[in-house]
Image: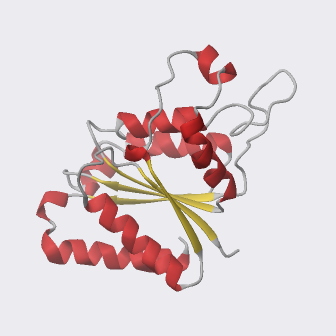
Amino acid sequence: MDRQRILLIQGHPDAAARHLCHALADAYAEGAVATGREVRRIEVAGLDFPLLRSQQAWEHGSLPASLQPAQDDIAWAQHLVLFFPLWLGDMPALLKGFLEQVARPGFAFKQGGANPFDSKGLAGRSARVVVTMGMPALVYRWYFRAHSVKSLERNILGFVGIAPVQETLIGLVDRLGEQGVAKWEHKMRVMGRQAA
């Protein structure tokens, strides 16, 4: 099934500068748009929202008004692509806080019966997770078992029904140089053309 509606979620928390994650997202968007797909973007660093501090707030609190467009874009999308740098072995806290806010019961989970998680509210969507890191990607994948990416895929994306989830791990980013960056931008354009 072709993915026509693609949402790019830029999870780099630095709004003051452009980073490799931004260049990769731009390249992916170029490829997707070139093949007639519709692309929307969310820049998490540009959003203003509080962190959730209790289960009560998550289950019964109101979604911050600043995040309603993001939730609408997630509902609209057929394919999501998340971009973020690996920080302290995990996604940046701002991205995690964003996901906690938007993935609420009634949206990410359709409530019914005794179990509020009995129906995955975002089923029918696929995703790709693109992660940049300073260490070699093979070390992260095999020695650390890509624990945080696997947790994102299984405990967040999979839990709300998003599947399949593909991953792209880009290591040794400080050593890529212009040629290395260009190589990864090309790969992202190809993925964008394929909506993969």
Q: Is residue 157 visible?
A: yes
Q: How is the image coloured?
A: secondary structure
Q: Quadrant of residue 83?
A: bottom left
Residue at far bottom of view: 35
Q: Please give left or right for residue 100 compared with residue 189 in the image.
A: right
Viewer-proximal residue among 143 and 153? 153
Residue at far right of view: 113
Location of the N terminus (image quadrant): bottom right
Q: Please give left or right for residue 82 compared with residue 133 in the image.
A: right
Q: Relative to 110, does residue 52 appear above or below in the rendering?
A: above
Q: Quadrant of residue 112?
A: top right
Q: Relative to 19, does residue 114 appear above or below in the rendering?
A: above
Give the number of callouts: 0
Give the x, y percent position of residue 150.
46, 44
Q: Please give left or right for residue 40 compared with residue 77 in the image.
A: left
Give the x, y percent position of residue 114.
84, 20
Q: Is residue 155 visible?
A: no
Q: Please give left or right for residue 195 compared with residue 112 in the image.
A: left
Residue at image point 42% right, 40% down: 95
Residue at image point 72% right, 51% down: 123
Give the x, y percent position of residue 183.
26, 77
Residue at image point 38% right, 74% down: 27
Give the x, y percent position of residue 73.
62, 54
Residue at image point 59% right, 77% down: 37
